[in-house]
Image (spheres, rainbow, N blue to C red):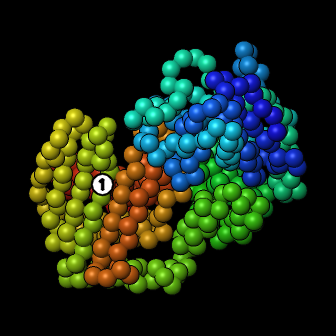
């Protein structure tokens, strides 16, 4: 544990793991904040149930160490995002840097945390002005290479080549992975964990999952192994295994079976759509405005739109044909909507969180609701479904006759 110099009687400390950690594995650091002043202070980032993001900046000429900070400085946060630290008190929180060091790789890395000014909606934050901000001292984090990949025959050069194929989005990625046997599958399974990152980094994880879904049955065992090796990525790897089993044709889990059975029924029997109701809200905030779709089993389409700055939403009613309703139902089936769930704990600044609710019939077993970050909708298996629902939400009334097939 190392402490930085006090600034306005506040200082930050950072604690790195004492045992070796592995690139791609679980890497959690502990951040401490001490209030040595005579008055309470309010600090962002220490509330466990409030979403936050981390910004990891590489070493630069003027600071030869990795700089970690909360990446939420452009967002106006509510009071519940801050915690009060009493005089003489020390608070702790964990910093999960697993994915940052998955890409960075093995080595001895100097690292420090800096508390950048964070804005509060009620000005109850602190250090909102000025260039001076508390920072921890520099600690050294020792990261070893991924032993399981080396044991599977994936050298550093091979790992780099496969990372570049992921980055480029090579169309033959699945064939490349097959060429490396079990090692290629193990590599892709570990890269799926990057789904829990945000932005471009997450796209690499989704591409790895797409490649594994082409390989299908042979990829389930490597995912199970990765789940045991990377407990910090359980959310992503658990979803990936469920998705792969679905693509392999396995029956839906028992608790999803009523929903899936009813969805199959409304695809085959148009007369059973009397209680069908789909609600899709792609955005609803003061910053982004509102765009909402309600779709009834009869084909009636209700679209609501409110531009940023407007106080009242405009509503328009349109209709879909039975054939177009078939496409919507099949898109829900193809996206395995019953498996969709949020994976990331935090969001990028001002990232929308679209919500979808599907009611197939009356009663809880036949209703599924999900709210995921925008990047999860746009990059994952639900991307085609989200694109279809966005076009159905268009307020300009353009025809839905050009709806693409769900696959």
Note whether 5 is above or below 347 in the view shown: above
Residue at 28% x, 80% y: name it.
361
Placement of the C terminus among the 4 image quadrants: bottom left
User: In the figure, 254 relative to 351: above or below?
Assistant: below
Above or below, 200 relative to 340: above
Name the residue that disc number 1 marks.
281
Location of residue 255 in the rendering, given as x and y in whole percent from the top left corner: 48, 82
Residue at horizontal 73%, vertical 58%? 230
Quadrant showing the N terminus: top right
374 with respect to 343 (left or right): left
State the residue in front, 123 or 236: 123
Furthest toward the top, the residue is 62
For the residue pair 380 and 32, the one nearer the viewer reads as 32
Report x, y in % for residue 212. 63, 60
Left or right placement of residue 233 versus residue 286 in this view: right
Q: Can residue 306 be seen in this view?
A: yes
Residue 280 appears at what percent x and percent y? Answer: 30, 58
Q: Residue at x 52, y 30 (%)?
A: 126
Q: In this view, does 386 lie to the left or right of 233?
A: left
Residue reaching furthest to the front:
38
């Amino acid at each position: 544990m190392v402490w930085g110099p006090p600034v306005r009687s506040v200082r930050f400390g950072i604690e790195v793991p004492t045992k070796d950690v592995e690139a791609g594995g679980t890497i959690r650091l502990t951040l401490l904040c001490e209030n040595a002043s005579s008055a309470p202070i309010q600090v962002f980032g220490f509330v466990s149930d409030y979403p936050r993001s981390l910004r990891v900046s590489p070493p630069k000429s003027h600071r030869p160490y990795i700089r970690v900070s909360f990446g939420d400085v452009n967002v106006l946060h509510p009071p519940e995002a801050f915690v009060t630290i009493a005089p003489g008190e020390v608070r702790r929180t964990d910093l999960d840097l697993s994915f940052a060091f998955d890409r960075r790789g093995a080595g001895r890395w100097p690292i420090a945390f800096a508390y950048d000014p964070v804005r509060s909606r009620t000005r109850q934050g602190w250090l909102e002005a000025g260039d001076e901000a508390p920072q921890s001292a520099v600690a050294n984090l020792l990261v070893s290479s991924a032993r399981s990949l080396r044991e599977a025959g994936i050298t550093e050069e091979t790992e780099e080549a496969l990372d570049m194929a992921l980055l480029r989005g090579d169309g033959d990625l699945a064939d490349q992975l097959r060429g490396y046997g079990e090692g290629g599958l193990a590599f892709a399974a570990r890269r799926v964990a990057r789904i829990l990152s945000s932005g471009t980094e997450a796209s690499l994880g989704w591409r790895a999952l797409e490649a594994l879904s082409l390989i299908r049955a042979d990829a389930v065992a490597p995912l199970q192994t990765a789940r045991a090796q990377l407990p910090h990525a359980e959310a992503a790897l658990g979803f990936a295994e469920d998705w792969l089993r679905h693509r392999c044709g396995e029956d839906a889990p028992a608790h999803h079976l009523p929903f899936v059975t009813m969805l199959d029924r409304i695809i085959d029997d148009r007369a059973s759509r009397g209680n069908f109701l789909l609600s899709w809200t792609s955005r609803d905030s003061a910053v982004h405005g509102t765009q909402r779709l309600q779709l009834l089993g009869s084909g009636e389409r209700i679209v609501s739109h409110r531009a940023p700055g407007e106080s009242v939403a405009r509503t328009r009613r349109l209709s879909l044909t039975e054939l177009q309703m078939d496409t919507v139902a099949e898109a829900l089936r193809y996206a395995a909507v019953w498996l969709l769930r949020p994976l990331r704990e935090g969001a990028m600044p001002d990232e929308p969180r679209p919500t979808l609710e599907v009611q197939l019939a009356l009663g809880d077993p036949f209703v599924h609701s999900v709210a995921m970050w925008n990047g999860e909708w746009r990059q994952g298996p639900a991307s085609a479904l989200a694109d279809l629902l966005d076009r159905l939400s268009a307020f300009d009334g353009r025809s839905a006759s050009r709806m693409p097939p769900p696959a």
